[in-house]
Image (cartoon, coloured by chain):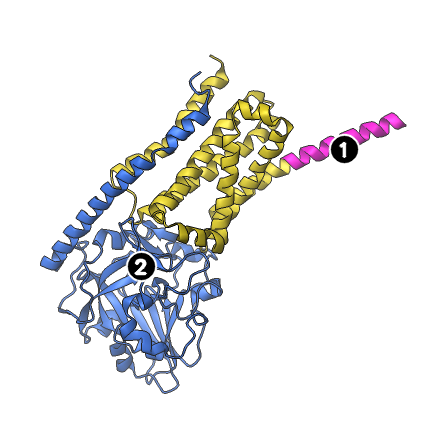
Amino acid sequence: MKRILLIKRLLFVAALVPALRLAVKAYRFDLTANPVDYITDYTGDWAITCLIVSLGITPLRRLTGWNEVVKLRRMIGLFAFFYATLHLLTWVVIDKFFDYAWMVQDVLERPFITVGMATWTILFLLAITSNKYSIRRLGRRWQKLHYLVYAAGVGAVIHFWWLVKADITVPRRWAVTLAVFFGVRVWWVMRKRWAVSRKETLLQS
Amino acid sequence: MLIKKPSDIRSSEITPKDAWLGRREFIQASAAAVVGAGAAAFLGDASAQGGGLAKLPNVKKSPLSITDSPTSYEYITSYNNFYEFESGAGDGPKRKSGNFKPKPWKIAIEGEVAKPASYDLDEFIKPLQLEERIYRFRCVETWSAVVPWVGIPLKSVIDKVQPTSRAKFVKFTTLLDPKQFPMQRTGLLEWPYVEGLRMDEAMHPLAILAVGLYGEILPNQNGAPIRLVTPWKYGFKGAKSIVKIEFVEKQFRNTWQVMAPQEYGFYANVNPMVDHPRWSQRADRPLGGFRTKPTLMFNGYQDQVASLYTGMDLRKNF
């Protein structure tokens, strides 16, 4: 078996571990004195982790020249959607208990929830168009649509940042990570442009 | 290949919703059982619950207690907001407060009083009657509890120290000691933590200085050795580990108001009609449970405290 496939399988199992761990904790009634907040934070943490790791795949590939790593990207992105969906369901089912009027009010009135909802919607769109059929069907538009993953990354960090009361250590860490990933991409694009323009100048002279 | 269609796996993975519902009910039932057992133990014999800390002697029951079953000792002492130990609610304060020294303890009475002085806390408390007060507790983050505090009416302290006519507010200051309070080495909040009450609020019979929980001395994570409890206000009003009670003429800014004035006010009265920018305050979730219950005006103490705020715009004075 090719090495990348083995890595992919191992990663698949590894990415399920947090969900299994949560299930075990729930079964053992070990979810702290405030289980709803615990489950919400836990699933949210893993959603943002998977999302930002998926955004790090391309920089990793370019830095290391390990091209195959891109084969892990979709799966990690789908795990981000999986945990984001558990996060959302925690809110809908356990926290708000299907009180739709209350949820609509929350989405409209609380900016961090508005952003969180928008972020999940993006992840949902990306997840349902992540199959080969959609890639073929959407053609060039597929790439444009999937650039939205950057918006999702930014949205997830803002959602997290705005909900903490005082200690922004963790959301700031994610923001810096995201900025580094974006930064290297911008750097590469700029460098490419410079290289092209230099080549043109050379050709002209 | 095993993993060729992650998108298919996805939808089946999401279904745990049903399982979750089942789990939720199961846990709710367990929670009810645990709380019920705790309540039974409490009603039968107050000493059945507790953390094995020193018992407080000669505690009088109070008609101001509510009759609801108290939240379990375990929950009350393992879910705390105590930013001097750790940011955010959880068991951090319990884990990190093991070496905190609540004894011996000095408490200073300062400002507009007949005789400013510093007292040994035990000596200060000794002549006063300890009372058990079973109160609702409501955190601004929307979780709640029923807590069997042991304490002394704040009024009895005020009567004892005789503030002058210039005293309009009471200011409570938490210990400043970065050796014992690790977060005080950071700039997370403006240290030391200060909180305050208007004089008439402080004189209200519901306001107490708590020195105990479940008939025992306060555990460190709950604000040992002495903390403020005002059950009609959000929990953050309850300054912990108090070293100074100061009588002042002018209103001042409490710690969370300094941190985010648009989010936290001086009064901090529990009010389901006035939302926090990030949390709807219409409901709260009792510790250990999954379902919310409607939050009551002044946390259910409306009959007793509403007259303190007659004519005030509670939307503005949140």
Q: Secondary structure at mark 1?
A: helix
Let me know if residue B214 appears in the view.
yes
Residue shown at the point (55%, 34%) measured from the top left: A55
Considering depth in this image, is A169 or B174 the residue closer to the camera?
A169
Mark 2, other Cα within 10 Å: few <14 / some 14–19 / many ≥20 = few
Q: Residue furthest top?
A: A1
Q: Is residue B119 visible?
A: no
Write down the quadrant of residue B199 in the picture.
Answer: bottom left
Q: Determine whether, in the image, residue A135 is placed left or right of residue A105.
A: right
Extreme residue toward the left, this view: B44
Find numbered disc 2 in the image and state the secondary structure of the residue it sits on: strand
Q: Is residue B149 left or right of residue A21?
A: left
- Dominant secondary-structure state across the stretch colored magenta: helix
Q: Magenta stretch: residue A66 in it?
A: no
Q: Which residues are magenta?
A: A185-205
Is label 2 on the same chain as label 1? Answer: no
State the residue position of label 1.
A194
Identify the image quadrant of the N terminus of chain B: top left
Q: Amino acid at mark 2?
A: Pro
Q: Residue at x 39, y 85 (%)?
A: B166
Residue nearest the observer in this picture, B316 or A7: B316
Label 2 belongs to which residue? B294
Q: Colour of chain A?
A: yellow
Of the chain colours in the picture, the one used for chain B is blue
Q: Are marks 2 and 1 in contact (CB under 8 Å)?
A: no
Numbered mark located on residue A37 in the image = none
Badge count: 2
Which is in the foreground here, disc 2 or disc 1?
Answer: 2
Crowding around mark 1 (Cα neighbors within 10 Å: few <14, some 14 to 19, many 20+) is few
What amino acid is found at the position of numbered circle 1 in the picture?
Trp
Q: Is residue A151 above or below residue B128?
A: above
